């Protein structure tokens, strides 16, 4: 274990990676910039004098080992994670440090659980996939809403996005996922991931005030379909996306997000509304904020801080809700999220 404040960010020059680097610095960590493109790393470091730059490639294990040497943890922001997750996890295991990523790819996250659960548990290592807006935030909200329930019949996660300007990384990851699925769609039902060819349903979701009812695309499955069932007994996990955001994502001409404030955040706003049901009872949780890519950074850095200070509930491959005290974790993000929790 190296310096407890040194954190390698693999894919540091990407859109989300830049937010993570900035948040690490704000929280008093020492980010190390890593990734395949040495020129882009140097360009990023030029605006942050004294920042360590360590180029590395997932095709070169030795370069990854050099990048992680002496670090306390590694955050993987470089997609597609179907390509990058396993090599960076292997390097983290060799270095004996925690691994956290921001993968939204359903199959890549499922692969992480399948491939590394036994090894990570045996080593006492901490590996956290999908510690991001998709996968991490939804899992924390569902876990918080569950409260003292040990099981539920169903969990619904509705994403109320004002719009969605996808990054190049989002588009690349989506292309990889579609290829892996053979163009099919995916849902989590009956306690397992199912692949299907039928069209996605359209319905109305009753978002809380002030958003109110909105048309959403049903079964718009995100990484929550992996993270939530990984530790909660919920056989049905359904996710929904506002129709406007879904159209933005599917339109190849939708531009990438543009900065609208001094922090580099876009003008996009979001409301994540969660409902869990058991028998005739229902519990809800909701979170509001701005910019789905920017808000991933405080989620990631809070996770890193808690891991390195021993505020975790387990070891091995674990989602956010399994690893952390969900209500306390969400409460710590009060400057980035507005939270509503109703039993």
Image (cartoon, rainbow, N blue to C red):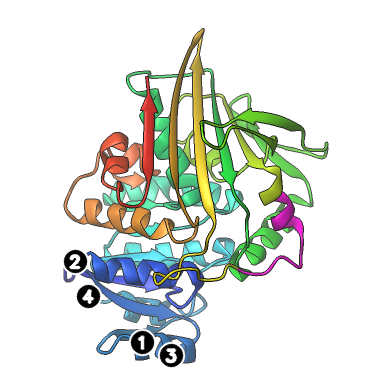
What is the x, y in percent for residue 118?
Answer: 39, 45
Q: Nearer the viewer, mark 3 or mark 2?
A: 3
Classify mark 1: helix, strand or loop: helix
Location of mark 1 (residue): 45
- Does the magenta portion include 253? yes
Classify mark 3: helix, strand or loop: helix
Q: Earlier in the sequence, mark 4 or mark 1?
A: 1
Rounded to the nearest whole Å, what is the CA distance between mark 4 and mark 3?
23 Å
Residue extending farthest right? 198
Location of mark 3 (residue): 43
What is the x, y in percent for residue 43?
Answer: 43, 90
Can the viewer see residue 323 in this picture? yes
Q: Earlier in the sequence, mark 2 or mark 4?
A: 2
Q: Earlier in the sequence, mark 3 or mark 2?
A: 2
The quarter of the rendered structure image containing the C terminus is: top left
Is residue 166 left or right of 295 when viewed as pictured?
right
Circles 4 and 1 in contact, beta carbons < 8 Å: no
Q: Nearer the viewer, mark 4 or mark 3?
A: 3
Residue extending farthest front? 210
- Does the magenta portion include 189? no
Location of mark 2 (residue): 1
Location of mark 4 (residue): 70
Q: Which residues are magenta?
A: 246-256
Q: Nearer the viewer, residue 4 or 295?
A: 295
Rounded to the nearest whole Å, what is the CA distance between mark 1 and mark 3?
5 Å
Q: Nearer the viewer, residue 245 or 171?
A: 245
Give residue 268's quadrant in the image.
bottom right
């Amino acid at each position: 274990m190296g310096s407890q404040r040194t954190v390698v960010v693999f894919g540091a020059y990407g859109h989300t990676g830049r937010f993570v680097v900035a948040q690490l610095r704000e929280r008093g960590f020492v980010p190390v910039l890593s990734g395949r493109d040495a020129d882009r790393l140097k360009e990023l470091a030029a605006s942050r004098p004294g920042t360590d730059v360590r180029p590395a490639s997932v095709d070169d294990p030795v370069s990854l080992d050099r990048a992680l040497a002496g670090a306390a943890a590694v955050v993987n922001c470089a997609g597609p994670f179907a390509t990058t997750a396993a090599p960076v996890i292997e390097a983290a295991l060799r270095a004996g440090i925690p691994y956290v990523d921001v993968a939204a790819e359903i199959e890549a996250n499922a692969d992480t659980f399948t491939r590394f659960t036994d090894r990570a548990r045996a080593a006492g290592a901490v590996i956290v996939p999908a510690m991001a807006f998709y996968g991490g935030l939804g899992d924390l909200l569902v876990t918080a809403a569950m409260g003292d329930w040990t099981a539920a019949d169903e969990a619904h996660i509705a994403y109320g996005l004002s719009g969605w300007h996808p990054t190049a990384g989002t588009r690349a990851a989506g292309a990889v996922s579609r290829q892996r699925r053979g163009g099919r769609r995916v849902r989590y039902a009956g306690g397992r991931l199912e692949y299907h060819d039928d069209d996605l349903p359209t319905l109305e979701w009753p978002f809380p005030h002030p958003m109110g009812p909105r048309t959403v695309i049903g079964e718009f499955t995100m990484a929550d379909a992996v993270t939530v069932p990984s530790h909660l007994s919920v056989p049905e996990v359904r996710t929904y996306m506002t129709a406007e955001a879904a159209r933005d994502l599917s339109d190849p001409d939708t531009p990438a997000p543009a900065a609208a404030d001094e922090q580099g955040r876009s003008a996009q706003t979001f409301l994540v509304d969660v409902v869990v049901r058991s028998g005739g009872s229902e519990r809800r949780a909701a979170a509001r904020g701005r910019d789905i890519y920017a808000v991933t950074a405080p989620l990631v850095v809070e996770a890193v801080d808690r891991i390195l200070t021993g505020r975790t509930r387990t070891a091995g491959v674990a989602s956010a809700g399994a690893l952390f005290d969900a209500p306390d974790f969400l409460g710590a993000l009060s400057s980035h999220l507005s939270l509503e929790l109703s039993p």
